[in-house]
Amino acid sequence: MQINEYEQLLIEIIQDLIIYLKKIGATKVEAEDISQDIFIKAWQMELDLPPVQLKAYLKKAAKSRYIDLRRHQQRTKIIINRFGPSLLKEIDELFYLDKVKIDERKLFDILERLTFQEQKLILDRYQYQLSIKTIAEQSNLSQAAIKMRLYRIKRKLRKLMKGNLNDG
């Protein structure tokens, strides 16, 4: 497979982008991921720019992507700090109630009420500890779809467990 001049130029610039991103604070993995994304987009666009302008354009795009990544990480941290303790308390109250202990049989009965696909998704995510991305790739769905399905299953389990606790 031959690499045309544009692709060769991109490859050279991407190596510089990795170094640049590491200098502005990105980890090696973040720098490589961002550079790879920028390479793919630039390769698909086939920009008609001189090498100097192309390098400046890609540097700016990489810096913007890195800043967006940092902002996303900060927002996530704020959300976890703000809502994490209350969510953990809710989970503790839901699954580990001191007053009422759910024995294994009741829990098994609750899990049996889920569809096969729901059971598989729960097992993949929590027992086998597969990432959302891996599950999405295996099931040919988007990551957002997997996250939404997990959310709905957890909500369903919560309802089933509350109902079971009140009954028994």
Image: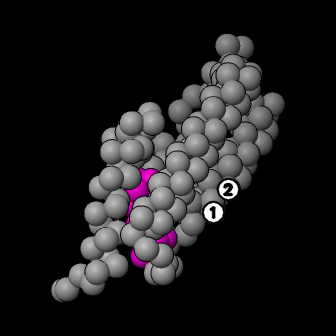
Q: Residue at the spot x=43%, y=74% of the render?
A: 50
> Helix or strand or loop: what does disc 2 sit on?
helix
Give the CA separation, mark 2 to mark 1. 5 Å
Residue 137 coordinates in the image, percent (x, y): 45, 66
* Pointer 2 with pointer 1, Cβ within 8 A: yes
The foreground one among 10 and 52 is 52
- As drawn, which residue projects farthest toward the left? 1
Judge left or right: residue 97 versus residue 73. Answer: right
- Under circle 1, the secondary element is helix
Q: Which residue is mark 2?
A: 148
Q: Residues within 10 Å of mark 2 (few under 14, many from 20)?
A: few
Residue 128: x and y, percent? 39, 46
- Amino acid carrying label 2: it is Met
Region in magenta: 33-44
Q: Quadrant of the N terminus?
A: bottom left
Viewer-closest of 91 and 6: 6
Q: Residue at x 52, y 48 (%)?
A: 63
Q: Amino acid at mark 1?
A: Ala
* Residue at the image point whose x is 58% and y is 50% from the top: 64
Measured as percent of width and height from the top left, residue 56 is found at 48, 59
The image quarter containing residue 106 is top right
Q: Answer few, some or many: residues within 10 Å of disc 1's Cα (few below 14, many 20 plus, some between 14 and 19).
A: few
Q: From the image, tell me which residue sits under label 1.
A: 145
- Up the image or down, 39 lies above or below 25; here it is below
